[in-house]
Image (tube, rainbow, N blue to C red):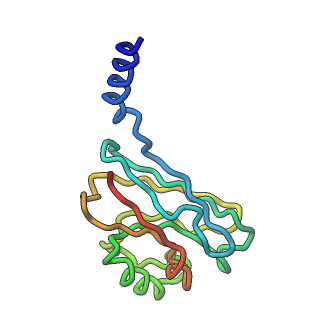
Amino acid sequence: MIRTLALATALLSACAPAFAACSVEIGGNDAMQFDRRTIEVDRACTDFTVTLRHTGKLAKNVMGHNWVLTTTADMPGTASDGQKAGLAAGFLKAGDARVIAHTPMIGGGESTSVTFAVARLAAGTAYTYFCSFPGHWGIMKGTLTLK
């Protein structure tokens, strides 16, 4: 019995990368909060998908949310430069190479997603995700790590 259990455990461990969670759902509300502070991306994933749900009721032009991923070092500049771009551009500067991935801006009750190549992430690099709507990025953020 113990030998069978040990064999089953070893097989499950060996197969773990095949069952890597390569997606996550995250919610943003009318109080400018994400419902997750951290996201872990398994390096066994080829692509990773983030689905953003706006769990609030307010419209996009009042309380819009998006999900933007940059290195932690690039986040303040990316967010600051994006303010000038306006709502139609999702408060992101067009062609900003510092942006690894982002969703469109959405309003209350809406959802959207983005898929990006895990190969764009580097082990040991600090990543931050945030909402680029003006005034949100200071508190509506979290960390993403490659594991």
Residue at image coords 48%, 72%: 130
Q: Is residue 138 above or below residue 21?
A: below
Residue extending farthest right: 57
Nearer the observer, 115 or 121: 121
Q: Position of residue 93 (x, y in %)?
A: 40, 79
Nearer the observer, 10 or 95: 10
Label count reads 0
Residue at image coords 52%, 55%: 113
Nearer the observer, 79 or 27: 27
Q: Is residue 134 above or below residue 124?
A: below
Q: Position of residue 95 (x, y in %)?
A: 35, 73
The answer to which quarter of the image holds residue 144 is bottom left
Residue at image coords 65%, 63%: 54
Residue at image coords 49%, 54%: 50
71 relative to 31 in the view: left or right: left
26 relative to 116 in the view: left or right: right
Q: Is residue 111 above or below residue 62?
A: above
Q: Position of residue 65 (x, y in %)?
A: 58, 71
Q: Position of residue 104 (x, y in %)?
A: 52, 66
Q: Quadrant of the N terminus?
A: top left
